[in-house]
Image (cartoon, coloured by chain):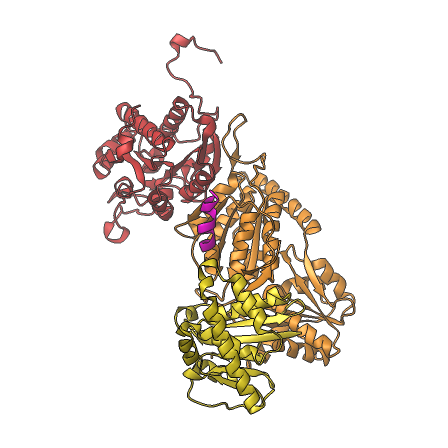
Chain colours: A yellow, B orange, C red
Amino acid sequence: MQKEILIAGFGGQGVLFAGQVLAYAAMDTGKIVTWIPSYGPEMRGGTANCTVVIADEEIGSPLVKNPPAVIALNLPSFDKYEDMIQPGGVLVVNQSMVDRTAKRTDISTLFVPGNEIAEETGDRRLLNMVMVGALLAAFPEMNLDDVKAALKAHLPQRHQKLLPNNFAAMDKGYAHAKAQLEGVGVR
Amino acid sequence: MSKELWKGNEAIAEAAVRAGLQAYFGYPITPQTEILEYLSRRMPELGRAFVQAESELGAINMVYGAACTGSRVMSSSSSPGVSLMMEGLSYIAGTEVPAVLVNVMRGGPGLGNIAPAQSDYNQAVHGGGHGDYPRIVLAPASVQEAIDLMGLSFDLAEKYRMICMVILDGSVGQMMEPAEMPEMKPIVDRKFEWATNGAIDRERRILSSIYINPPAEEVANFRLGKRWQEVQANEVRYKEYFLDDAEFVIVGFGTAGRVALSAVRTARSEGIKVGLLRPITVSPYPYEVIDQLAGRVSGFLVTEMNMGQMYDDVRLAVRGRVPVEFYGRTGGVVPFPDEILGEIHRIAAGHWSREADPRVSWQTRMADVISEK
Amino acid sequence: MTTLAPNNLVYDRPEGFTETPTHYCPGCTHGVAHRLIAEVLEEMNLIPRTIGVAPVGCAVFAYNYFDTDFVEAPHGRAPAMATGIKRVLPDRIVFTYQGDGDLASIGMGEIVHAAARGENLTVIFINNANFGMTGGQMAPTTLPGMKTTSSPNGRDVETQGYPIRMAEMLATLDGVGYCVRRSLHDPKNIRLAKKAIRMAFETQARGLGFSMVELLSTCPTNWGMTPVSSLKFVEEHMMPAYPLGDYKVGAAVATIKI
């Protein structure tokens, strides 16, 4: 088994941390994993992305051209990565930041109003956790409880008080995506 | 010890600390700055020396000074900074003192960019500084391997009184992988019989790279040459994948080797008998294993993140017996596995290049691939 | 060799010296500077604890003369090498011995930053207004109008710039504990130079920061003068351009009694 997840958005949207949470969960459940960011000028406010590869054996390339799973937190990422996803893959889009619908019909595209859900959960910075939760509804290789456990295990002590809100954000994202999946009958 | 998720650059820094690093001297440059930043916190908390130097020139000469005392010492930089350090490296080599230098390579030449590249291979392996000098060069492809090789680098540098460079591309430096750190080793005074650490209760010592008398310099260079033969005989390291029944073999180091592994696995699932050789020491180079493979496979494909530098070493080992193809991306562009897979398909279909330098037809093929966007 | 009775002995090789015969030209003051350093190290009982850093220049073989551990730096990098040594061996005494090409030209970055960091090092800076080893080319310290092999018509400040006054420049840095200029052109000034060298090593031994003694020196061979006229040249031409003086004596350093 090898699966790749690409997460993309603006700097400051929590792109890199979202990937790290998934990487920790993969590691803690005994998988082999790589996490690699785009680095450089993008770090300073432009677009940011990271790729997480999860596998059962030694991972070759840490980057893939056509990932099976993408989280797009803004319109430029939606535009860029919609074309690149493997047929049959899943694309989770932050609906709050895009103004169009999906072009492709051979992948599952889930629209989640991440900003609104994050804000109603208490903090707009929870966006990344909302979107991670949403992805997990359509990514059977990882489960929500393992990701929550990983977040709890690796969040520094001083941030542990943030866990309930983070968990709530994941749950809401997950529920929103699940409902959408069942509603439209994809996957 | 359990595994932790480590970022490559920070893992290198911590691994060096645990190997008994006594002093670090560096200068900020992307994409290796995390090593400097990590050690700026870690070294003082352990009471060890850390100096952010005025330049890479300053840094490597601080390394040189500390190395003369027999201390475990290192610097790290990225391509343009390493170019500046070449003066010091040559002096360190000529003085026969051990030192470790990490180069997190980026796209070049010149200022280039900060994206991952392997284009300093020739500088590290075949040249760089002036004069005849050998040096050990290790090329990790993963965070765990980088950790393991950092410990090894100090041991090798001291064993052979030689520079040990660790070269990795920016993506290994920036990526995170689960990895296990070794236990913290205590700092030990290795009591080297050559160290200039103060002539207390002993005869004074001089460390210098000067041999004003040419025959004496010649003798010194032969001494280095002999020592290098020992290194070549004992320290070659590589990793092989699917070589047992391989009909042709890809050779790639570092990230290019990893990317090739993905392509090789896919090709294997399609029934193509292709293998992979990933050199871990690029100096000493695994000539012998390639020599042996050349006797039984139909050819090689070298993949690199440069214009074809290690390629010449593969050809040297193959000695014209079978074709050696090349596929590379350069300037900070990292190849995707499907690009390598495309090359595997081409070769598996029997399209071996027969020209004198297959890098020429590679460049022709790339005309449709490369684009400024 | 006959041994003199102790009461007849007026001049002897200091303990800090090896028995290596000098390679410096007749009339060159490098030998004087070397001797002063050796005497000071002996008087302070520092010989076994001292590590010297030789430059590239005429003093490239300085390590042959001092009976201490020595390393040989790339051109201009002695302060960086010394930093590396001192940082891992803070209880040792580390000094560099550098000429004006080495220190004020190619090694300007290293010297300024070693001083700015307040490295506990001692720098003995030989200013003889030219590159000696390579045959008398213009140095940053070459006087305006002075003829050298690379300023054959005399240093033209319009195209070749102005002399650099290192002692004055480094004295502005907070990391510097002791920074003075002395001359080696006559016995009185040689005695004052020795006292300054002593102060510089005392500064280091007490951990009071960077210390440098700039020594106005002769280069009869490349100046094309006799040893005596060279000494006069220092007095008449170099001293006006490079005034002797204490450019920085830190408050703690000023309390040192020797």
Query: How many numbered marks, from 0 up?
Result: 0
Residue numbers of the magenta segment: B36-49
B91 above or below A113?
Answer: above
Q: Nearer the viewer, residue C76 or B74?
A: B74
Q: Quadrant of residue B339?
A: bottom right
Picture residue at 68% right of the left edge, 80% below the top:
B346
Chief SS of the magenta region: helix
Q: Is residue C179 left or right of residue B347?
A: left
Picture residue at 29% right of the left edge, 43% below the top:
C174
Q: Nearer the viewer, residue B327 or A12?
A: A12
Q: Nearer the viewer, residue C97 or C58?
A: C97
Q: Position of residue C79 (x, y in %)?
A: 40, 42
Q: Position of residue B42 (x, y in %)?
A: 47, 49
Q: Position of residue C189 (x, y in %)?
A: 27, 26
Q: Is residue C137 visible?
A: no
Residue B43 sits inside the magenta stretch: yes
B74 above or below B361?
Answer: above
Residue C40 sits inside the magenta stretch: no
Which part of the image, by quadrant, shows the C terminus of chain A?
Answer: bottom right
Q: Position of residue B327 (x, y in %)?
A: 61, 73
C4 above or below C159?
Answer: above
Which part of the image, by quadrant, shows the N terminus of chain A?
Answer: bottom right
